[in-house]
Amino acid sequence: MDLGEFEDKFDEAGKKKEFIVFFCKCKIVYSGRAEASLSKGDRLVSVKQDGTIFVHQPEGGNPINYMKAGGAIELIKQEYGLLFKAYNATTKEYLELEISRVYNFMSKKLEDGQKQLLAGTEADMSDMIKQNPTLINKNFKPLSREEHTKFGFIDVFGHDNKGTLVVIECKRYTAGLDAVQQLRRYVEKIKELKGINKVSGIIASPKIAPNAEEMLKKWGFSWTLVNPPMRLLRHNKNQKDLQSFWS
Amino acid sequence: MDLGEFEDKFDEAGKKKEFIVFFCKCKIVYSGRAEASLSKGDRLVSVKQDGTIFVHQPEGGNPINYMKAGGAIELIKQEYGLLFKAYNATTKEYLELEISRVYNFMSKKLEDGQKQLLAGTEADMSDMIKQNPTLINKNFKPLSREEHTKFGFIDVFGHDNKGTLVVIECKRYTAGLDAVQQLRRYVEKIKELKGINKVSGIIASPKIAPNAEEMLKKWGFSWTLVNPPMRLLRHNKNQKDLQSFWS
DNA sequence: CGTGCCAGGTGCCCT
DNA sequence: AGGGCACTTGGCACG
């Protein structure tokens, strides 16, 4: 596509605050929280209706470059083609694309006010434990969930049948060293605040890393196997495997 | 765009392993590591050349849905339109788009083998400290950097002029409680391994949170102000502020 | 606004 | 494959 034509289309779409996407060949420089540069190649560039920018390479999961909404965009003619210049004054970030060719361009005003519903998070997990405390053990009595304290927030907090306070840290996946440390911090802080020297710490997760378990035991804590809330398992036996992508 | 026409184009582009993007109106269901659903709205759908899928709403930073490469994609005719069905057999994840309209379609085979160069990361920071240890203090002698141990990896490791071992944990931004606990874990582990009871712990960061500093002192560690490696500051006085996006 | 922390986190590296 | 951790992390909730 002719770069002049692209410039017109881009400008027009921008004025109408449309969602813009185009394929191009470009060099990239980013400067802001870090410095990054990427030499010439083909990429997808997208500019959302709020000004959010993404640059994607043809493969891989993450955008190679991006800018959050709230900046300014300019197209400037250069000898090699077009300079796409994005600048965010508040974060002091730059993103510059030296565009030598534009292959395709597409824009449209999109209407979408929907928000995603999500289930199966860690919050759901702590909720489940609060509702069904025997998942931990038969003596556990929950008091609160996701309680915010100055030193972090505790997933589930309660006590056992002897009145000993219990702190539970939930992890949706394998609990690692960080989870143990988090638990340790809460337990220590509660001991300190309450002036007591016995507080139980439990990690509730489907799995725990060997190192983490070792550290857990060393600190007198324990682990209980809890799986995150049941999910719709649609990959049942009758599920025929689709063929590999485009094979 | 007619859905039949879209189906043909999509199929054709898929066979050629092109990068595909299209605007559409759709409902979305995800099932896998969690359960998510999103009711009808306009979105950008992109399918990369390796099969990576992204769905973007017209605003906001992150894709509302995505699938990693390695899955299978099918288009299935339904009464309401088209069912875009992506399934990853290994991760057992589903992504289904009930597409009622397609507005625009674009596809192209992109060529890009470039990798991004990035500067100003935490690794650069620890490198800088190793090269220039006086950033910590005049007595610090670095021994190793990013040393991997069984219990994590230590950003910078060394000793002072009295032979006391020193562990440094770097953070590019404000150090929080997690950073202090990371440091604490390394220090404790080294004490244990070496059978010594004096090891220094230092956090090197541009800033430290009050809570974190309190905890740091409590454990006898210290903080040194270190900024991440100098970046090109292009937002100098002469920089004219560009106007706000499309204003 | 800073602090803390989860995320369908993702990606990288090392064991 | 699994663990440990940074990330231009992003996003939310709360003080």
Image (cartoon, coloured by chain):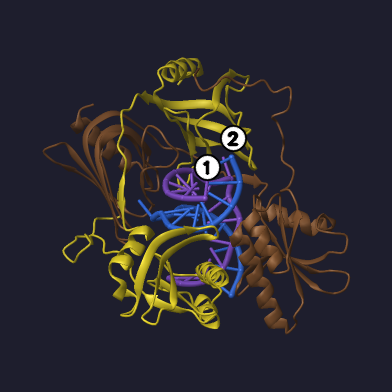
Chain colours: A yellow, B brown, C blue, D purple
Q: Tell me if A71 is positioned left or right of B89 in this view.
A: right
> Would you say the residues marked 1 and 2 are in contact, meaning their CB atoms lie under 8 Å apart?
yes
Q: Which mark is residue A147?
A: none
Where is residue A42 drawn, in percent x and y? 50, 36
Mark 1 vs 2, N-terminal side: 2
Q: Which numbered tag is attached to residue A28? A: 2
* Percent coordinates x, y for residue A66 in the rendering: 52, 37
Q: Nearer the viewer, residue B170 or B26?
A: B170
- Specify whether disc 1 shares its chain with disc 2: yes
With respect to residue A156, does A109 lie above or below? above
Tell me the tag on residue A64.
Answer: 1
Q: Quadrant of residue B168?
A: bottom right
Q: Report whether residue B35 is seen.
A: yes
Quarter-of-image position of residue B34: bottom left
Secondary structure under badge 1?
Answer: loop
Label 2 amino acid?
Ile
Q: Say whether residue B175 is visible.
A: no
**Residue at x 47% of width, y 57% of height:** A148
Spatial distance from mark 1 to mark 2, Cα to Cα?
10 Å
Q: Chain of mark 2?
A: A
Q: Is residue A14 above or below residue A239?
A: above
In which quadrant is the N terminus of chain B drawn?
A: top left
Q: Would you call the spot at circle 2 few (<14 residues within 10 Å), some (14-19), or many (20 or more)?
A: many
Does A130 sit left or right of A218 as displayed? Answer: left
Chain name for mark 1 = A
